[in-house]
Amino acid sequence: MLLQRLTLCSRIQLGSPRHVCRLLTRPLTQAPQGRAHGSSFAHRGELRQAKRIVVKLGSAVVTRGDECGLALGRLASIVEQVAMLQNQGREMMIVTSGAVAFGKQRLRHEILLSQSVRQALHSGHNQLKDMSLPVLEARACAAAGQSGLMALYEAMFTQYSTCTAQVLVTNLDFHDDQKRQNLNSTLQELLRMNIVPIINTNDAVVPPPEPNSDLQGVNVISIKDNDSLAARLAVEMKADLLIALSDVEGLYNSPPGTDDAKLIDIFYPGDQQSITYGTKSRVGIGGMEAKVKAALWALQGGTSVVIANGTHPKVTGHVITDIVEGKKVGTFFSEIKPAGPTVEQQTEMARNSGRTLASLHPDQRSEIICNLAELLTERKDEILAANKMDMDLAVNAGHLPPAMLKRLSLSPAKLNSLAIGLRQIAVAAQDSVGRVLRRTRVAHNLELEQITVPIGVLLVIFEARPDCLPQVGALAIASGNALLLKGGKEAANTNRVLHQLTQEALSMHGVREAVQLVSTREEVEDLCRLDKMIDLIIPRGSSQLVRDIQRAAKGIPVLGHSEGICHVYVDSDASIDKVIKIVRDSKCDYPAACNAMETLLIHRDILRTPLFDQIIDMLRTERVKIHAGPRFASYLTFSPSEAKSLRIEYGDLECCMEVVDSMHEAVDHIHKYGSSHTDVIITENEDTAEQFLQQLDSACVFWNASSRFADGYRFGLGMLWFYHHIICFLVPFSLCFLFTTACIFLPIFICYCLSRQLQAFSPHDILFTFLSFSHHLWLCLQEQRLVLARHVSMHGALWAWRGCSPPSGS
């Protein structure tokens, strides 16, 4: 589509004799999809649809702290955001203060210069500063500052090829029908030509505001200040959104700075009685009460309103764009009150109920978990019906890859397995909270005890994996922690049923609210900002999800996990039967799991042998797609598709196959391309196996065992394990992890054990890991690894769990 172009030249005394702005008449296809005016947006997420936006800049935003002159850096960042939104196809209008402050600065300079030239030239700076100045009348300051303020705006917007136009109004312009129609027509024409109108009250002639004249009926608002002007203008122009920037974060339930003051995320009409207003800002003639009245009037007229801070140096550069993107910034005014509690209220309820949960007797917590396990089996039809709804929606949408669909799917076998795991946790919960780890006699009749205590409130964010909800819920219950859950929308129906069952189990001991499911439209980034309410964030999902949460959570510790790029190395001395069984189980048992094999390393001597042919035949039978590594492809005349990368987590019936010359080369390959998760060697040579186990730097290293054994059930620790990719240690998300200690001596406490039984290990027979957090910094004093080795001897299968060398005497 061709755009009509119009060039406008404006002469401004700002160092350049000529500034050129280009005006583009806006085609309708450029603008965002708006909505029919008449009702405001119900949720923050809908603000992305706002097409016509009014930005109100309070006096505290545009003026400096000394009230003489403008905050140029702050103003420049606001102009940049407005220009960016304008260039996106939105229609932007600015209601600005600052003329009085700009004029006051200008008149002060004029007065100083008009005094004795000799006194001005020969006096020191301090003397000039102390010279008495007359009290400047606000109307005169406004008259002197209007032209300079507008020239400054025009110069700034010109840098973004955006034109501006000044519009001065008074209260009479809105009360006179003809003037109001003329004003509306003028603004409509400016917006059509892609010009940003900059509106201000004509303070040079405006009469003093009448007391108690904020509201005059439903359809009329008195133009008492720029807050009321912005509200009246937004309704008159049928704006979708009004952004009121001030020097406070938003609306508080009591004056900011007081002990009980809390920022209100969403404000609803009728909540005025719960607000205690403080004094107005250092400049301007309004205050928070005036802003709220104006906001409610605009809301009633169909315009959404957000009050936010435009002075904070860390957020000013993106506050407007963040609001338009629907992020949780400032106070959002909404006419529709949600049926359930807000996420802040949910977190508060979880914390209070979690403290009661922590004080329960261990038998009571175990009883809750056992009850939940029974509910999973008794109500499996209800769970599976909800899961079928989620699966049907996901399949019809066609957005989820096959690996995600497998994780989303539940079955009777999965539910039975979940129930078994929950009962396992219930047994382990008997001596969890309040266990004495260390007792020290500090002095006579003075002892110091170190005991396990819950961390507090956990936020667990998981994607399309509903079985994660009862797993994490049981671990939180056993450890006495409150829990906030945010699941993927793909599993919304299943998560809802599972959460209901969890709360039903909790109700038996009066702690129903200890586990909360966030089902509102809260963005993950917004949840990560609740640093005063949440003690630890645990993401369960893709590596991209983990990275996004780590970036978003500024003041909350995040326990992230690594990718599951697991390797199986087939040595030249491997047994044929073991190779086929282990490779099949590692890849085909559950390809979407993080402990599934993704790369198969083959010793060069195995190529063109019956063992190699059997491996290929087995993978083909299981319909595993093979991607050839560079060396493997070079050995074949007709090779499979070459792998795009040797560092891929397929999560499906696909794997990479590569050739190595030795065990040492396999170790180097794993260190270079692996994720330090779980890696396997298959060999009958014990010396080779020992070297592999000792040299490989991974969390779990297995000898003649499937990578699928890297599982909490097998280790007796619960269901979930986390593998940190930087320091390469295994953190069990289990009872031993979900505690901190009442008296901290070391971040990590290690108990060594050697278990040689093929059965579920009890918590006393495992490698205990206790982590304590100091804000978001947590220290790891010693690397920990799990080595699962299987020795075949005349006595049958013998399993060994090897950890760090035990200290002498242990």
Image: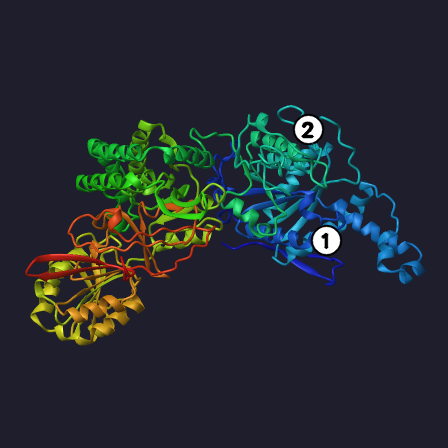
Left or right for 154, reference 131: left
Q: Which of marks 1 and 2 is nearer the N terminus?
A: 1
Q: What distance separates the C-alpha of mark 1 from that of mark 2? A: 31 Å
**Residue 635: percent from left, percent from top:** 17, 76
Q: Which residue is at the far left?
A: 794
Q: Is residue 453 above or below residue 777?
A: above
Per the rendering, the mark at residue 373 is none
Residue 639 visible, this angle: no
Q: Which residue is at the far top?
A: 217
For the residue labelled by badge 1, is the local secondary structure a helix, a strand or a loop?
Answer: helix
Q: In this view, does 764 lie above or below 637?
A: above
**Residue 171: percent from left, percent from top:** 72, 33
Q: Name the residue under label 1.
A: 151
Q: Residue type at mark 2: give it.
A: Asp
Per the rendering, the mark at residue 214 is 2
Residue under the point 76% across and 59% down: 13
**Residue 219: percent from left, percent from top:** 62, 26
Q: Is residue 776 above or below residue 497?
A: below
Residue under the point 62% across and 34% down: 236
Left or right for 242, reference 352: right
Quarter where residue 710 is shown: bottom left
For the residue labelled by badge 2, is the local secondary structure a helix, a strand or a loop?
Answer: loop
Q: Residue type at mark 1: give it.
A: Ala
